[in-house]
């Protein structure tokens, strides 16, 4: 009569069937671990869409918008007395591409500002998140500007600006500004 | 290699993989919940902006020759005291539109979320458009606006509870 008991050595079964079962179990578990690893770390952050314009945390998006507001107020506040210092300070808040474009447009503006002795102060009346991804945030700003020319009475202008902020090694920088 | 040695290593591997899979399952479960919460929060931004854009679009498109439709479009997306006040003054609004033969057209240029929670939100909206009336001799004049829109979530919809013009402040 055949011996139907599993052979055991030092407490471990030694049949080929056991080996195959253990091997199959290991494969299944390895596949499960691989699937979990992919789900946890392999999927990328979704890109923003009209349905999901903000794909980062509220605090992260808000901090970028706050930087945009501070930077925009600085960029749009100019004085004929210190236009060159303003240019240096404003471009330090921008990405290299944006700084280059800004300097190009600033040359004719400087002449006009200095000749007409124009001072402009800008205050952010409201700010909002338009779109936010981990490396890029679009902020809508309502800007109130007070402008005096040649010591005359102030003129007030309500402006709207869409500011593109990008994440760099130096933090959030202004990559584009559109005003209307 | 003898089968007993192979099986010993395989048993240890299975135990390790079981532990890793169990830990992974717990992390996956938690992450799945976090991502579902994040998706809900992120979609809320989109829903709020769509509702605010629709309401403001209705607000900046008023025609004297379709005055009732214009007023109804605004009222459809409004709620609370704002809606009550708007509906109460609708006849007056219609009379003003007709008297001045006002044609106001506009569109949303940009909108952004200022504050948001599961049942309340504030949105700022920039529009561009034209206004023509008897004062302009029917000639459309450019008219850009800045709005602050307060919204509440009611019965599965985002509705406007207030609209303010954001003017320039001296």
Image (cartoon, helix red, strand yellow):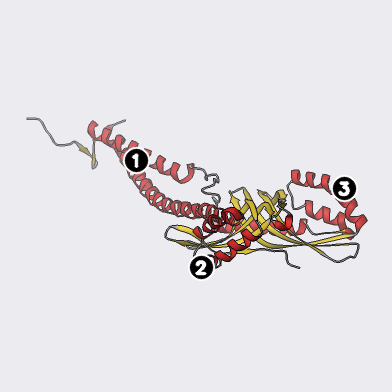
Residue under circle 3?
A: A108
* Secondary structure at numbered mark 1: helix
Q: Do discs 2 and 1 share a chain?
A: no
The N terminus of chain B - image quarter:
top left
Q: Give the Cα distance between marks 3 and 1.
A: 68 Å
* Secondary structure at numbered mark 3: helix
What chain letter is assigned to the residue under label 1?
Answer: A
Which of the two residues, A93 or B4, is positioned nearer the viewer here? A93
- Farthest residue to the left: give it: A1
Q: Position of residue B9 (x, y in %)?
A: 33, 38
Drawn side of residue B5 relative to residue A98, left or right: left
The C terminus of chain B - image quarter:
bottom right
Q: Give the Cα distance between marks 2 and 1.
A: 62 Å
Q: Given this view, does label 3 or label 2 mark the residue nearer the observer? A: 2
Which of the two residues, B147 or A102, is positioned nearer the viewer here? B147
Which dot marks residue A29? 1
Residue count near mark 2 (Cα–Cα under 10 Å), binned few <14, some 14–19, many ≥20: few
Q: Does residue A91 appear in this view?
A: yes
What chain letter is assigned to the residue under label 3?
Answer: A
Q: Do discs 3 and 1 share a chain?
A: yes
- Farthest residue to the right: give it: A115
Drawn side of residue A133 relative to residue B25, left or right: right
Is the Cβ of the residue at disc 2 closer than 8 Å to that at disc 1? no
* Secondary structure at numbered mark 2: helix
Q: Position of residue A173 (x, y in %)?
A: 70, 51
The residue at 30%/35% (across/down) is A24
Residue count near mark 3 (Cα–Cα under 10 Å), binned few <14, some 14–19, many ≥20: few
Q: Position of residue A132 (x, y in %)?
A: 59, 50
Quadrant of res B34: bottom left
Which dot marks residue B84? 2
Drawn side of residue B133 relative to residue A27, left or right: right
Which of the two residues, B75 or B3, is positioned nearer the viewer here? B75
């Amino acid at each position: 009569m055949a011996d139907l008991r599993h052979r055991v050595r030092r407490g471990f079964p030694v049949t080929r069937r056991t080996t195959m079962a253990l091997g199959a179990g290991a494969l299944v578990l390895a596949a499960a671990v691989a699937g979990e690893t992919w789900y946890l770390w392999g999927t990328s952050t979704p890109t923003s869409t009209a349905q999901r314009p903000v794909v980062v945390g509220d605090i992260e998006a808000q901090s970028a918008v706050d930087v945009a507001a501070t930077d925009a107020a600085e960029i749009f506040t100019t004085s004929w007395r210190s236009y060159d210092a303003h240019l240096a300070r404003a471009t330090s808040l921008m990405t290299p591409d944006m700084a280059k474009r800004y300097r190009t447009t600033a040359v004719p503006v400087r002449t006009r500002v200095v000749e007409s002795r124009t001072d402009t102060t800008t205050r952010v009346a409201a700010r909002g998140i338009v779109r936010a991804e981990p490396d890029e945030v679009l902020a809508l700003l309502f800007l109130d500007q007070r402008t005096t020319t040649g010591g005359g009475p102030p003129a007030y202008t309500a402006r709207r600006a869409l500011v593109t902020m990008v994440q760099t090694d130096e933090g959030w920088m202004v990559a584009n500004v559109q005003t209307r | 290699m003898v089968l007993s040695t192979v099986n010993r290593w395989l048993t240890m591997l299975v135990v390790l993989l079981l532990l890793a899979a169990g830990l992974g399952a717990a992390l996956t479960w938690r992450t799945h919940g976090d991502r579902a919460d994040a998706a809900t929060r992120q979609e809320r931004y989109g829903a709020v902006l769509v509702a605010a854009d629709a309401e403001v679009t209705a607000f900046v498109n008023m025609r004297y020759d379709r005055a009732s439709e214009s007023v109804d479009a605004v009222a459809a997306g409004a709620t609370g005291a704002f809606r009550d006040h708007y509906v109460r003054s609708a006849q007056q609004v219609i009379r003003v539109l007709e008297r001045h033969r006002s044609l106001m057209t506009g569109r949303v240029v940009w909108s952004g979320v200022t504050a948001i929670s599961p049942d309340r939100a504030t949105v700022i909206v920039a529009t561009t458009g034209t206004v023509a009336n008897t004062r302009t001799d029917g000639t459309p004049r450019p008219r850009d606006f800045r709005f602050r829109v307060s919204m509440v979530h009611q019965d599965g919809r985002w509705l406007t509870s207030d609209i303010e013009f954001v003017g320039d402040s001296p």
